[in-house]
Image: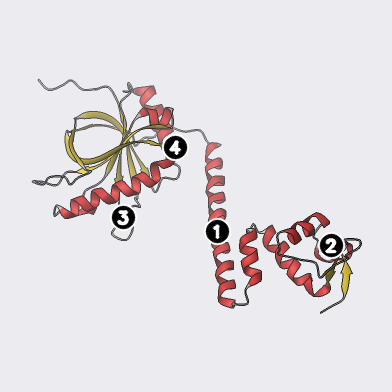
Amino acid sequence: MGARVSIGDFAVMTSLSRKALRHYHDIGILEPAHIDSHTGYRFYDTSQVDHAHIIRRFRSLGMSIPDIKALLSTDDAAARTAIITTHLEQMEAQLQQTRDTVGALRELLAPVGTPAQVEVQRKPALTVWSIGATIDVSEIDDWFGESLSTLRGAVATAGGAPLEAVPGGLYDRALFLESRGEATLFVPAPESAHPPQGVRAEVLPAAEFAVLTHPGGHEGIDRSYAALGRYVNEHLISHQGPIREHYIGATPCAPTTFTATEICWPIFSTTAPPE
């Protein structure tokens, strides 16, 4: 035990305000060493200073109260290390997210130029296995992962090589306009096989698209959409059908990570149909 000090002196020693000290007392992570039964004054022990500094430091680093409670309530070094390591990993992820956001904001300072790599392509009719749903934009990542896993499993069961069947998606304009709409994930159908329950067989009709390949992951794809949409509306005639994407470059170690996304914006035909 050390010396007993008033809450005022303890506040100076720890850089914790009276309000913060009362709050930490109320939630049980820093209780006074003594409370005068007549005056209600709180007194602390100098041995509690390090404890208070730990709380203040980790709170300034964004650690949650439950995690601080767990950290201070255990003498197990491994448990403490696990709590701190987990928080550091969360901070690193937040830091990377901030860096990505800063990079995206800096890109916005430069105007979107017309990309030279936009191509007009006529995609032939394609027989596919697909999974469709009406979803909110906020649900699309979970839906995408589950549907892709189901489709690849179906292809593997049919005797095909899942990673060789490049997946694609169809996205209704309502998803962009109303944040809710139809989405369909598809893969080329294996030959001479019937789709399992929950997967449908259909034929995507031949159509003409303006195509731009977005490199890397999903980060920054809004810029590619903007560039492609600008090109289409300045040089071609936009069709209001669903947007189509193809996902390229998955590997066995990262089956849901792609090296590029081919964005296909539907357009009215620029070539005469065959006689």
Q: Between tags 3 and 4, which lies in front?
A: 3
* Residue positioned 22% across, 28% down in the render: 207
Q: Which residue is mark 3?
A: 255
Against 75, is 121 above or below?
above
Whichever of callouts 4 and 1 sits on the residue coming sooner in the sequence is 1
Q: Which residue is mark 2?
A: 11
- Asked if the residue under mark 3 is in contact with the one under mark 1, i.e. CB atoms within 8 Å, the reply is no
Q: Amino acid at mark 1?
A: Gln
Whichever of callouts 1 and 3 sits on the residue coming sooner in the sequence is 1
- Asked if the residue under mark 4 is in contact with the one under mark 3, i.e. CB atoms within 8 Å, the reply is no
x then y, percent, for residue 141: 39, 45
Q: Amino acid at mark 2?
A: Ala
- What's the CA distance linking mark 4 and mark 1? 26 Å
Q: Which residue is mark 4?
A: 222
Whichever of callouts 3 and 4 sits on the residue coming sooner in the sequence is 4
* Residue positioned 58% across, 58% down in the render: 91
Q: Quadrant of the C terminus?
A: top left
